[in-house]
Every structure is written in structure tokens, then in C-alpha cells.
Image (cartoon, rainbow, N blue to C red):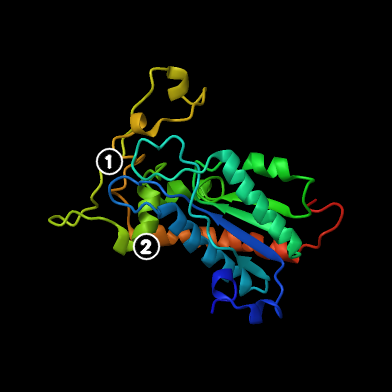
């Protein structure tokens, strides 16, 4: 039994060992180029979440990881078979209900560990602010949490099923990475993308919801072929150190009228 994983602990343990901080991993069910499984985001959320919670727990933080949510917002990938969509409003309601459950059970500190770029969670935090006693923090682990080290570890991290995600897969669920049976190479295209007709959009001055079937060939964004398991392990070490450190600090910080300031 891993005491920091709610899905594995018993009521006999929980009733005598109250938690202070909850971690909610958010995943998705969607294609990841030709070589990674549909559950890649959820697998990543589960693996990262379990490791950061373990590291924090072993430093004395009473932290618990909730079961990962395996569905996310896929409205722009629905042209691909079995991309399973929760609309942003639906996802927000699911998170709201889970937050209400935590409040009812006296856990007032929550970290949302988001593993899917299509999950736009910041508006949920704004909507719930002041309406719940639960203080909600958000970590998009693939974003600013690790932005400064990506260039040191990866040639080009990529956006979706690229070098970064493929490296994590090779390190932590290699049996699910598809390979060419003759060459042993990763069975994927190079993750190249198409530009729009608008220079301002291509430069990032103007934003759109990207229609994935027009953006990509096989859903990949970023070249996965330079990926290695060693890069995935190095990247994981950074995330565990940084996110677990935050969880320890969060658990130790008392709640008062000025929290978190």
C-alpha cells in the first residue's frame, strides 16, 4: 500500500491518518501520433503525480493523490477516432464537484496537476475563488514548471507526442511505445505541422483553437525520433524535485486570513 495514493489505501488507514493536501491529476484520451497510446496524458499524470506525492510524503507532508481523471477537452481533435471529449464547461463542473467533496472532508489545499494542454483550468480557479474554502493551485507540468530546463534536455521538446512526451514514455511505459518491427525505430512520423494562411496566427500574435486534423498528419506536433529513456528520466527528476518541494511547503504553511500571502 502506497499511503499517498488514495486508490490504494484503506478506510482503516485514512480514518487514523488525515491528509492536509490533495493532488488531482488531469489527463485525456486522445491519439498521440502513431506510436504513443491514447492514454499518454493520463499515464503521465499518474506517474508524475505518484512520484511527486511520494517524495513529498517521505519528507513529512500529509499529501494524497486522487485518482487521475482520464478525460479532457478534445473539441479540436474530434476528427480523429475515439478522441474522447469533455467540453470545458463540463470539465469545470467535474472539478467543482471534486473540490466540494474535498471541502466537505476538511482538505483545504489542492494542487491540480494538469497533463493535457487542451484543459484550460485557469478560468475554473477564477470561478471557484471565494466560493469554496479550498485553496486551489494549478501546475501544467509541461509548461512554465520546466520551461528553463527543456533546452538542456531535449533538442526540441515538441508540443504533442514529440521528443519530450516520447522520452517520458520510453522511460516509464516503454512497452506501450509502438516500433517498426523491422528497424526497431519508433513507428511515427516527424511531427511536422502545417501553417495557417495568416502570418499573425503563425507568429503567435493571434490565437485560434487549432483544428488538429488540418494542423497535423497523424496528430503529432514535434519530432519524437531524438527521444531517449535517459532524457525522460532526467526530465522526471526535475519535476519531482520542484513539484514535491512545493507540496512540502504547501503542507507546512498554515491557513490564515492572508493565505497564501
Q: What secondary structure is marked by label 2?
A: helix
Mark 1, other Cα within 10 Å: few <14 / some 14–19 / many ≥20: some
CB-based contact (under 8 Å), mark 1 and mark 2: no
Classify residue 253 as left or right of residue 229.
Answer: right
* SS for callout 1: loop
Task: Please say if 241 is above or below 71.
Answer: below
Q: Which residue is mark 2?
A: 171
Residue 243: x and y in percent read 59, 59
The residue that label 1 is drawn on is 190
Quadrant for residue 168, please give it: bottom left
Badge 1 or badge 2: first in the primary sequence: 2
The N terminus is located in which quarter? bottom right
251 w.r.t. 38: above or below: below
Instruction: Name the residue at 78% across, 47% down.
Output: 131
Q: Pinpoint residue 13: horizontal percent, then vertical percent.
A: 65, 80
Residue closer to the observer: 102 or 169: 102
In the depicted structure, whether residue 192 falls above or below residue 47: above
* Residue at 55% over, 63% down: 67
Amino acid at each position: 500500500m502506497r499511503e499517498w495514493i488514495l486508490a490504494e489505501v484503506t478506510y482503516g488507514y485514512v480514518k487514523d491518518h488525515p491528509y492536509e493536501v490533495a493532488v488531482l491529476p488531469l489527463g485525456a484520451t486522445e491519439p498521440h501520433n502513431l506510436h504513443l497510446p491514447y492514454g499518454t496524458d493520463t499515464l503521465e499524470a499518474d506517474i508524475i503525480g505518484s512520484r511527486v506525492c511520494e517524495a513529498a510524503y517521505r519528507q513529512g507532508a500529509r499529501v494524497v493523490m486522487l485518482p487521475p481523471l482520464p478525460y479532457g477537452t478534445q473539441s479540436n481533435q474530434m476528427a480523429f477516432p475515439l478522441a474522447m471529449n469533455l467540453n470545458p464547461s463540463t470539465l469545470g463542473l467535474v472539478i467543482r464537484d471534486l473540490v466540494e467533496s474535498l471541502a466537505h472532508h476538511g482538505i483545504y489545499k489542492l494542487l491540480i496537476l494538469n497533463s493535457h494542454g487542451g484543459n484550460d483550468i485557469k478560468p475554473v480557479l477564477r470561478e471557484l475563488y471565494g466560493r469554496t474554502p479550498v485553496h486551489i493551485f494549478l501546475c501544467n507540468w509541461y509548461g512554465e514548471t520546466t520551461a528553463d530546463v527543456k533546452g538542456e534536455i531535449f533538442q526540441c521538446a515538441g508540443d504533442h507526442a514529440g521528443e519530450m512526451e516520447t522520452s517520458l514514455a520510453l522511460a516509464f511505459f516503454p512497452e506501450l511505445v509502438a516500433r517498426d518491427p523491422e528497424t526497431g525505430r519508433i513507428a511515427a512520423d516527424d511531427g511536422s505541422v502545417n501553417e495557417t494562411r495568416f502570418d499573425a496566427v503563425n507568429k503567435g500574435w493571434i490565437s485560434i483553437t487549432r483544428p488538429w486534423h488540418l494542423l497535423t498528419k497523424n496528430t503529432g506536433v514535434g519530432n519524437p525520433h531524438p527521444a531517449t529513456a535517459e532524457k525522460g528520466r532526467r526530465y522526471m527528476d526535475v519535476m519531482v524535485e520542484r513539484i514535491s518541494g512545493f507540496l512540502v511547503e504547501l503542507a507546512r504553511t498554515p491557513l490564515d486570513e492572508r493565505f497564501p500571502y
